[in-house]
Amino acid sequence: MAKLVSKVYGDALFSLAVEEDQVDELWKEAAMISGAMEANPEFLPILCHPEMTMEKKFTLLQDVFQKGLSQNMMGLLNVLLKKGRIGEILPVLSYFMEQVMAYKKIGKVNVRTPMPLSEEQKEKLENKLLEVSEYETVNVDYQIDEGLLGGMVIRIGDRVLDNSIRSKLDAMSRQLYKVKLSN
């Protein structure tokens, strides 16, 4: 159900952003709200508390976000609050930001390696990713995974390119189990 809520409201916000040429502005605001909510994990439970009146919730939202947000983003927050969906704000904003990244052809890539890559290696990898994908820019998150032994694992969206030594050893092991020795 949460996925449906995030898609419905995220698509509505994205359509509005494109229609009113506010994609960049609303994207920044969504990132700001997400950051604020993650930095203050006690805020959302307060907004969702059943004993707090709707008027107090609206006032709290106004006090916290009114000065830093556009009318369209405040409208989304108010609609979510009114419909009892304010607890889904983070998934809605996450979905919206994914839509914006696809629209702007920005790829989100996760790269795991057993040791840190040099700046030259990172640059070559990013250039290769741009060359073989439809993206115009990529945001790469580099992570160290000492369990890989060697090679790297690249995740782009739901696609995974596993070129690690561990995966190659696992594949060889599976092939060896299939071999039947005869006398």
Image: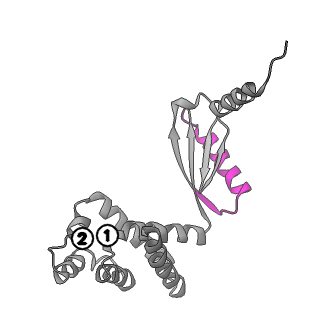
Dot 1 falls on a residue whose secondary structure is: helix
Image quadrant holding the N terminus, namely bottom left
Image quadrant holding the C terminus, namely top right
**Disc sitting over residue 103 in the figure:** none
Residue extending farthest top: 183
Report whether 41 appears left or right of 182.
Answer: left
Please name the residue shown 31% across and 69% down the image.
87
Please name the residue shown 43% across and 74% down the image.
5
Q: Magenta stretch?
A: 115-138
164 to 7, vertically: above or below: above
Q: Residues within 10 Å of mark 1 (few under 14, many from 20)?
A: some
Residue 181, how many percent across, how many down?
Answer: 81, 18
Residue 83, how many percent across, how many down?
Answer: 32, 82
119 to 34, vertically: above or below: above
Residue extending farthest bottom: 20
Q: Is residue 80 highlighted in magenta?
A: no
For label 1, the residue is 87
Please name the residue shown 27% across and 75% down the image.
65
For label 2, the residue is 48
**Callout 1 amino acid:** Gly
- Type of colouring: one colour
Q: Is residue 137 highlighted in magenta?
A: yes
Q: CA distance from mark 1 to mark 2?
A: 6 Å
Residue 7, how many percent across, how many down?
Answer: 49, 73
Q: Residues within 10 Å of mark 2 (few under 14, many from 20)?
A: some
* Label 1 with label 2: CB-CB less than 8 Å: yes
**Callout 2 amino acid:** Cys
